[in-house]
Amino acid sequence: MIEIVRHLVIIFGLLFVLTTVSAGLIWLERRLLALWQDRYGPNRVGPFGLLQVAADMIKIFAKEDWIPPFADKPVFVIAPTIIMVATFLSFAVIPFTPGIEVVSLDIGLLFFLAMSSLGVYSVVLAGWSSDNKYSLLGGIRAAAQMLSYEVFMGLSLMGTVMLAGSFNIRDIVEAQRGLWFCIPQFFGMVVFFIAGVAETHRLPFDLPESENELVAGFHTEYSGIKFGMFFVGEYLGITLISALITALFFGGWLGPLLPPVVWFALKTFFFICLFILLRATYPRPRYDQLMAFGWKVMLPVALLNLVVTGGILLAKGA
Amino acid sequence: MLSMLRAAWLVFLHMFRKRETVQYPEERRPLPARWRGRIILSRDPDGGERCVACYLCAAACPVDCISLQATQDESGRRYPEFFRINFSRCIFCGFCEEACPTYAIQLTPDYEMSEYMRHALVYEKEDLLISGQGKYHGYNFYRVAGMAIGGKDKGEAENEEPPVDVRSLTL
Ligand code: SF4
Ligand code: SF4
């Protein structure tokens, strides 16, 4: 009984915290982007403009939720929910601290990869059901981009799996007690980070959206709360990838003095800021450049990393 | 690759730069001396309306946002019965001021004209007319113009000679 209650508390606590955090990220991103562009950003509503989040929420709920008459209604409605659900489900396998974890799956990492692949459906279906050429183009791009980056996202993680000898993320974190995997798996980390940016289709890999050529890409026709779900889904994705990088390469909750939760939150926060810094810095590559970069640079690096890690492990083990 | 890292670092350093933003309602930038803002109708030094309802401003306005109707008082002075400027269309080009022969219509440095209702941007004569002379002091059109109005006949304006009686001319 107590166990069940504990689980429920963790699940709903996480849902609440994650939604709040990803909503807060909207404010954070705007503030940070402004900082890096010599502006102030939203600083009027409430202390430091923090209530901007509330104002945005009220606005987005009050906006007309319009479904274009030419859209494929059921698919159009279900598309934004998929990304939210898939991302939330991925959080289930992430161990925030030894105590806070929804489920300790032995195939945790595979589960995450599967869920992030499902996330693609959201974007593709949104683009397709909108029955609008820009949305469709965005959807097609998203499909191609996310599928190809998925390939070496998976490969880049296999090095850590080899080192830890487990797919369970908790075991991977525990295996980093001596040395964080960001050092032996440096290339794996870089590849995973880049793939993560592409996976959440954030700038500089936001070709499915690319405002200046595709209006808003796959969510051109979305408004009101459905648009809000895509938006929050995107920020959830950032949080997810940041949390994963923390757990897989930067020792998760491990760290001196401070309690584990704080360590995890701090590291995750750092990577979220890095995501935003990327957006503030880089221009968007052309679509063929993106694909070429993925297949010609990232994939070989991931493979090489895998082979070398495997070789070293074999040599050591033998 | 290295240049990309450097770019990110440079962007990061911008965090410590001075902000470009002017925090508007609290902080204001000095306006240029010839700023063209909210339009007013001025009065002459004697307190009469300067506008003689000649329609030149309405004709000059490139967006046709001035509308007025001329009328006359008992002394023969022309004035606008109504004078309406739709500021939601005005582009503050200042052509009306240039066209005006009497310095009546003038643009001022006020730019804070936001309204919640669009129709509140349509200013009537009561909203436009001010009690003073605006930018140009001491000018009274009827005092220098040759037109006869009540209390001032032809030839009585400033710097004006009395009209020549053609019948008095001898060959
Ligand atoms: S400033 Fe230009 S646009 Fe505005 S009323 Fe005068 S002439 Fe018209
Ligand atoms: S404001 Fe000037 S230009 Fe316009 S009608 Fe009056 S006198 Fe004529």
Image (spheres, rainbow, N blue to C red):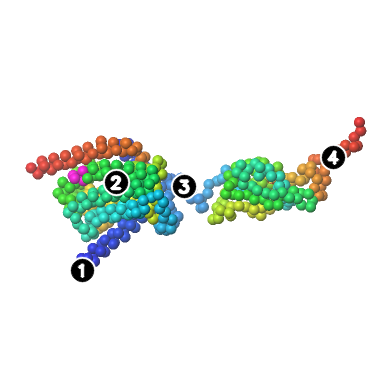
Q: Earlier in the sequence, mark 1 or mark 2?
A: 1
Badge 1 is on which residue? A1
Left or right: A221 as drawn, with respect to A302:
right
Q: Does the residue labelled 2 lie within 8 Å of ligand 1?
A: no
Residue located 25% across and 64% down the image: A8
Dominant secondary structure (helix, strand or loop) of the stretch shown in magenta: helix
Q: Which of A173 and A130 is in front in this view?
A: A130
Q: Is residue B50 visible?
A: no
Q: How far apart are marks 1 and 2 (CA)?
A: 39 Å
**Badge 2 density bin: few <14, some 14–19, many ≥20, Cα 10 Å:** many
Q: Distance between the residues labelled 4 and 1?
A: 113 Å
**Badge 4 density bin: few <14, some 14–19, many ≥20, Cα 10 Å:** few
Q: How far apart are marks 2 and 3 (CA)?
A: 34 Å
Q: How far apart are marks 2 and 4 (CA)?
A: 90 Å
Badge 4 is on which residue? B163
Q: Is mark 2 on a helix, strand or loop?
A: helix
Badge 2 is on which residue? A199
Q: Where is residue B145 in the image (x, y as percent from the top left)?
A: 77, 43
Q: Which of marks 3 and 4 is nearer the N terminus?
A: 3
Left or right: A311 as drawn, with respect to A273:
left
**The numbered mark 3 sits on a residue in which chain?**
B
Q: Are discs 2 and 4 located on one and the same chain?
A: no
Residue B56's image quarter? top right
Residue located 57% across and 49% down the image: B88
Q: What is the total number of numbered labels drawn onto the structure image?
A: 4
Q: What element carries label 4?
A: loop
Inspect the image, locate mark 1, and give the three-letter code of the amino acid beneath it: Met
Q: Position of residue A156 (x, y in %)?
A: 22, 43
Q: How far apart are marks 3 and 4 (CA)?
A: 64 Å
Badge 3 is on which residue? B21
Question: Which image quarter is the C terminus of chain A in?
Answer: top left
